[in-house]
């Protein structure tokens, strides 16, 4: 019997068949949302999201991180280099 993988959103909700889930991929400079794909969802660098609400939260968090890293201008890294 095949094991059905369990998918869990960042908010802790577990995926059920009726949910409209989406996928996201975040790197340091890029965020991308993708339609649900069970094969993609198994990848380590893919973030599983239970819907628009969590996708929006992830987007806003990532944009916040970009803003703070841009405004700080990385003084420690400059000092080291
Ligand atoms: Zn969620």
Image: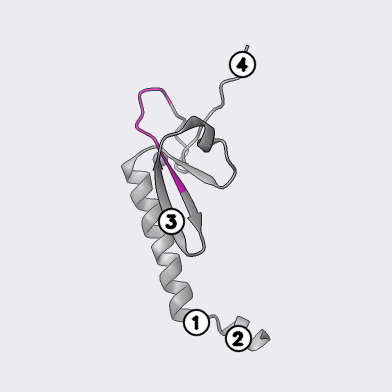
Mark 1 and 2 residues: CB-CB less than 8 Å, in contact? Answer: yes
Q: Are marks 2 and 4 in contact (CB under 8 Å)?
A: no
Q: CA distance from mark 4 to mark 3?
A: 32 Å
Q: Magenta includes 23?
A: yes
The label nearer to you, 2 versus 3, is 3
The label on residue 78 is 2
Where residue 4 sits: x, y (%)? 56, 21
Q: How many marks?
A: 4
- Queried on whether the Cβ of the residue with tag 2 lies below 8 angstroms from ligand 1, the answer reads no
What number is the disc on residue 73?
1
- In the rendered image, residue 14, in percent from the top left (x then y), is placed at 47, 30
> Mark 1 or mark 4, which has the lower sequence index?
4
Quarter that holds the N terminus = top right
Q: CA distance from mark 1 to mark 4?
A: 50 Å
Residue at point 41%, 59% (across, down): 61
Q: Please report the bounds of the magenta region as a residue range.
A: 16-24
The answer to whether the residue labelled 4 contacts the one labelled 3, judged by CB atoms less than 8 Å apart, is no
Locate residue 19, reporting x and y percent.
Answer: 36, 28
Depth check: give the residue in front, 29 or 49.
Answer: 29
Q: Quadrant of ligand 1?
A: top left
Label 2 neighbourhood size at 10 Å, few (<14), some (14-19), many (20+)? few
Of the two numbered discs 1 and 2 on the same chain, state the one appearing first in sequence: 1
Left or right, residue 40 beside residue 77? left
- Between marks 1 and 2, how big is the CA–CA gap? 8 Å
Q: Label 4 belongs to which residue? A: 2
Q: Residues within 10 Å of mark 4 (few under 14, many from 20)?
A: few
Residue picked out by circle 3: 31
**Mark 3 vs mark 1, CA separation in Å:** 21 Å
The tag earlier along the polypeptide, 3 or 1, is: 3
Label 2: state its secondary structure.
helix
Q: Which circle, 1 or 4, is nearer the viewer?
A: 4
Q: On the picture, is 6 further left or further right than 50?
A: right
């Amino acid at each position: 019997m095949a094991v059905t993988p369990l998918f869990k959103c960042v908010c802790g909700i577990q995926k059920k068949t009726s949910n409209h889930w989406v996928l996201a991929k975040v790197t340091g400079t890029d965020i991308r949302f993708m339609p649900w794909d069970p094969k993609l969802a198994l990848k380590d660098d893919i973030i599983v999201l239970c819907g628009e609400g969590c996708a929006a939260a992830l987007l806003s968090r990532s944009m916040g991180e970009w803003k703070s890293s841009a405004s700080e201008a990385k003084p420690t890294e400059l000092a080291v280099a």
